[in-house]
Amino acid sequence: MKAGKIAFKRLKETDLPLMHRWLNTPHVSEWWEVSGKKLPSLETVREKYLPRIKGNDPVDCFLIAYDGMPIGMVQSCKMDDFPAEKANFNLDQSCAAIDIVIGEEDYVHRGLGSSIIREFLKEVIFKKYAVDCCIVDPYVENEIAIRAYNKAGFKYLKTVWYEKESRREHILSINRDEIELDKEKGGVKYKGLDT
C-alpha cells in the first residue's frame, strides 16, 4: 500500500455508528469486547464511548483517518488513572497506554498499524501526557498486533495474567526518549486535541 497521510481527530458521537460497525466485523471482534460483550449493540457502544467523548472518562478516543478516510480508532490513557490495572501489570513508572483498532477491512494486514502507532506516539501520547513511557497489553495470542507494536518500536517487558479479562497478556513498552518528536519529519496532520 502506498504511503498516505495519517491524521487523528477526537472521536465524536456521530462516529459511534461507524465504531459499532467496526466492532462487529470478524477481524475486530476476535480481539475486542465492549463492556464484556463481543459483537456489541449500538447502545452498548454508546454507553461505553459517550462518556469518553464527553470527557467524563479518563480514556481519550481518536478517529484514525488515512488520506481522509476514517479507518479505525485509537484510545489512550494515563495508567495512573487506572491504579488496579497499573498494580496488576506491576508498573512502577509513569506511563500511558494505548489500544488501536483498524476497522476497515481493506486497510488490515497492509503494514499500516506500526506507522499509525508511531505517529500517535509522536503526535499525541508524548505531547499530551507527562509520562516516561507508553505500554500496550495485547493478548499473548494476538501475534499480528504484537508484530505491529514491535515494528513501531515497542519491546517486550513481561507477560501478566489480566484478571479482569481472564487472559494472559504481553506488556510491551516504549520510552519517551525512543520517539522522535520532530513534527516536520512525521508528515502527520493532527487536528488538535480540542477539536
Image (tube, grey):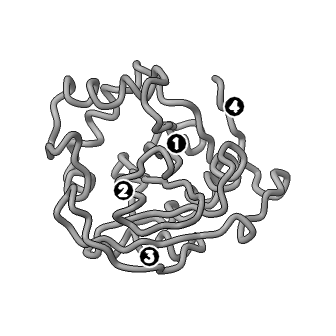
How much space separates mark 1 and mark 4, taking CA atoms? 13 Å
Disc 2 or disc 1, which is closer to the eye? 2
Return the mark for residue 44. none
The residue singled out by tag 2 in the image is 85
The residue singled out by tag 1 in the image is 64
Q: Residue at x 56, y 45 (%)?
A: 66
Disc nearer the start of the sequence (1/4) = 1
Tell me which amino acid carries mark 1. Ile
Picture quadrant of residue 27: bottom left
The residue singled out by tag 3 in the image is 147
Disc nearer the start of the sequence (4/3) = 3
Q: Tag 4's secondary structure? A: loop
Observer-nearest residue: 36 or 21?
Answer: 36
Disc nearer the start of the sequence (2/1) = 1
Query: Mark 2 near mark 4, Cβ–Cβ under 8 Å?
Result: no
Percent position of residue 71, x then y: 45, 43
Q: Residue at x 29, y 68 (%)?
A: 139
Tell me which amino acid carries mark 2. Glu
Q: Tag 1's secondary structure? A: strand
Tell me which amino acid carries mark 4. Gly
Density class for disc 1 (Cα within 10 Å; few <14, some 14-19, many ≥20) is many
Q: Is residue 147 above or below residue 84?
A: below
How much space separates mark 2 and mark 4, taking CA atoms? 29 Å
